[in-house]
Amino acid sequence: MSSVPDRSAAAGPGRTERDDASATVIPLSPGAGSDAGSHAGSGSRGSAGAGGRHGAGPTSLQVLRSLDSGPRGLLESVAEERLAHLGENVLPAWRPVSWPRRFLASFRDPFTSVLLCLGLVSALVSAWGTACVTLVLVLVSCLLRSGEEHRADRSAAALRELVATTATVLRRTSADAAPRAREVPVAELVPGDVIRLGPGDLVPADVRLLRASGLTVHQSALTGESAPVPKHPVDAPEPSVSPSGPFAQPHLCFQGSSVTSGSGTAVVVTTGGDTWFAAAHDGRARRRGASAFDRSVQGISWTLIRFMLLTPPLVLMANAALRGRGLETLPFAVAVAVGLTPEMLPVLVTTALARGASRLARTSGVIVKRLPALHDLGAVDVLCLDKTGTLTEDRPVVEGAVDGEGRPDPEVLQWAAVGALWTLQLAELPAPDALDEAVLDAAEDHAAEGDGSSPLSVYDGVAALPFDPVRRLATAVVRRPGRPGIHTLVTKGAVEAVLDRCVLDDGERERLLARAAREAERGLRLLAVARADRPSGARAYTSADERGLTFLGLVTLRDVPAPSAADALGVLAARGIAVKVLTGDHPGTAARVCHDLGLPPGEVVTAERIDALSDEELARLADRATVFARCAPEHKARIVSALRAGGHTTGFLGDGVNDLPALHTADVGICPRNAVDVAREAADVVLAEKDLTAIDRAVVAGRRSSGNIATYLRITLSSNLGNVLAMLTAGLLLPFLPMLPAQVLVQNLCSDAAQLAFAFDRPAAAALRRPTVLRPRDFLRFITGFGLLNAAADLATFGVLALALRDTAAPGGEAAFHAGWFTENLLTQALVMMLLRTGRNSAERKAGGPLRAAAAGLAAVGVLLPLTALGPLLGMAALPPLYYLLLGTVLGLYAIGLAAARRRYDRTNTAP
């Protein structure tokens, strides 16, 4: 029998055979032969084990046989053979992009497309010099961009491997060997693999359940439904009549979903591009909306492109009207339009972000999985987080246990410990619950002191209903000694949730709630404990059994503030980042912790109030409030969405399944490395540890990269605008063109190459103190103001050239004029690079070695190139010594004017 399943026989209707190994086609209608085609309607995707239109679907045994597998899993050799034959379990849209494809894609950049069109126009009018230099600019920009993007993508992929998601798979080394469970990368799963699923796991492929215990999954990525869906194995599934199609089938789990609770064992039936997730999303799940930074840059870019497209016809009309020139000025008009273009912007953005991400991983252990997330981090002005593990230590400390009258009662702690022990033992949680561990520690201490309570070992665990953020409680079912035929339910959780399930009159309930509120105002966390006896039976326990309970009392716990939290909050506030606390705890508890850490809690907003607000009202409230209590996952996501709608750039720090919606909603999703798989997969940034100081380091790295990009844009565009305005003015005043098209383009190429050094610059400390946001109006005011100052210096050089050359109509006069203006333009751009960097003191100006070297090199090219053999080829001649003396005076005055204008701008503008 072949070790690779027969594709053509097993593929159901709507499933076409693929010839490429990268698209893994797996049997989705696994009754190969006679059953093939009976499980899906015409034109629909088949699904392993889904019921067809005519009778029940294949049994679990039939599915395993069709996949040439069994309950003990595949042989290692068979799995390797299938992986080589079918390809990795990777969505097509997530596969690495080759360098040639990146190179071709770079031509779709708006600036590159405009340059390419201008070069073709120049070729059509036989301006071959202009056309060649323009096309060289395009080629150099595309080569550099695709090379940097390819290198950055490989670096990012290497970083992502450090936090790659794995799956627990059963495999055997030989036919007679026992199966061994081990972790393998999700990409190495193949059809027929038998895997284990647990809470917090991502479902790594489309699978058919073989066994399950209390399994529920989130399928919101596929169906949009936020509530967990229960799943269990079905030996012979009935036909599906649900409008949700196969997603409603209880025995099927799909790639893109995640395990909320319980555990299971399943066989992989579909991987790669043939999963339902791949079909439904086709890569769109990875695409995010443009960030505020992206939108600002795009708005500025399209403004420049419109101006570039208007420049050639305006130059032609002006020269025709005032100088009687015709199409011979078209190459000059094209060169002027090209002079406005920041051709190296994509290259610089990729380089700056890749360097920042690499340095962050090397120095702080922070992994940036999505490269643009680094500059989004630089723009974050609101950070949302839970208090546990960030503002406080992961494990609280038990303060005491009291009965309903407020009297100390060790029995309450004893029953809480029984529930905690068997919940930890039976619920198969992704990580031990901190509250359960704290309760067990306290019970052990009391037992050591000899308080007379029974040892926990006398209780036998029967079942467990783990905590979930909707019920806000957990239940363990145990057998008590001397109580045959009776099961005892021990329920503990949020006070309101437990009291709602207890037999109490309204007055007693209100009294207990008031007592709990008083304890919470002291900053204590509360666990309500209740109990009920039930006749033992064969059926499984569900949340419906959590009714008619007897209230036992309260366990009070105290959060221990994290040692670094107060200082980290102060640092984040100094950087202009507002911290919002989104917690499931009692409002009083959350407020007290924030107060103790120096974070004014203000008005605490509860989930009930959030539910009563419209989106617009919530956006206004979220802007003012600091603490949000009793939040379920959907509340956290809605708060983050409201903050974004209010114009904020948001980061969200979370580590659990209940944080998944908010991680997806935020501009930047952040999680620690020990987060559950599904959170780690959803996050953009993975921290070495759950620590606010690590977030501060990541924010600084983001602002450093974003600041360099913003500085490049300001300096490049203001210089380019000034040069273009000066050339247009001089072109109308002179009887000849102030610069030849080839000279304009070579000057542009030299300055662009030098300005790539901004990717390696270190911004001033002032630039790191607030979020990096490009406000288009302020930005355009900056480049207009400094562009006009640059144009004034260029036009002053016009007078210098008139004095130094006296007669430009003499032989060689035009060539000398061109050389003089070429030299001045590059020297002024070198000055601008050094003086318009973000405001610095004298000590900071000594830094920035790469930028100083680039500016010096640009100045050297400007002075020396006209004197070399290339000068005559470009239409330039040597200049008299008087010109350099007068030019030095102009440059000195220009430097003084630049410095004064920069100081005034810094005083009157709060934006970087």
Image (cartoon, rainbow, N blue to C red):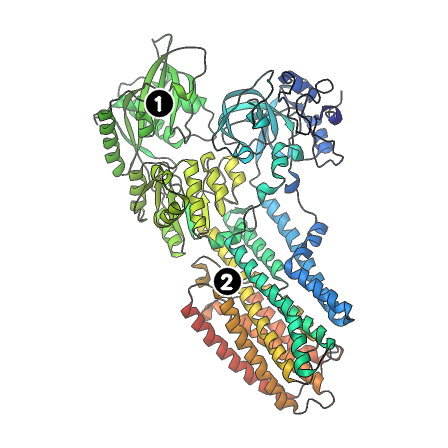
Q: Earlier in the sequence, mark 1 or mark 2?
A: 1
Callout 1 amino acid? Thr
Q: Nearer the viewer, residue 641 or 359?
A: 641
User: Eyeballing the image, is 43 above or below 108?
Assistant: above
Q: Position of residue 476 (x, y in %)?
A: 39, 20
| Circles 1 and 2: CB atoms closer than 8 Å | no
Number of numbered discs visible in the structure rendering: 2
Q: Nearer the viewer, residue 593 or 606?
A: 606
Q: Position of residue 750 (x, y in %)?
A: 65, 70
Binning the other alpha carbons within 10 Å of mark 1 as few (below 14), some (14 to 19) or many (20 upward) gives: many
Residue visible at 39% across and 25% down? 474
Callout 2 amino acid? Pro
Residue 721 figure quarter: bottom right
Q: Nearer the viewer, residue 610 or 131?
A: 610
Secondary element at tag 1: strand
Q: Position of residue 519 (x, y in %)?
A: 25, 34
Task: Report whether 100 appears left or right of 180.
Answer: right
Secondary element at tag 2: helix
Residue visible at 56% across and 27% down? 243
Q: What distance separates the C-alpha of mark 1 from that of mark 2?
A: 56 Å
Q: Position of residue 101 (x, y in %)?
A: 71, 50
What label does residue 269 carry, if any? none
Q: Is residue 750 visible?
A: no
Residue 813 figure quarter: bottom right
Binning the other alpha carbons within 10 Å of mark 2 as few (below 14), some (14 to 19) or many (20 upward) gives: some
Task: Report whether 517 appears left or right of 841.
Answer: left
Task: Report whether 723 appears left or right of 462.
Answer: right
Q: Which residue is mark 2?
A: 776
User: Eyeballing the image, is 187 above or below 113?
Assistant: above
What label does residue 491 carry, if any? 1
Q: Foreground mark, 1 or 2?
A: 2
- Please identify the residue farthest to the front as the structure is shown: 321
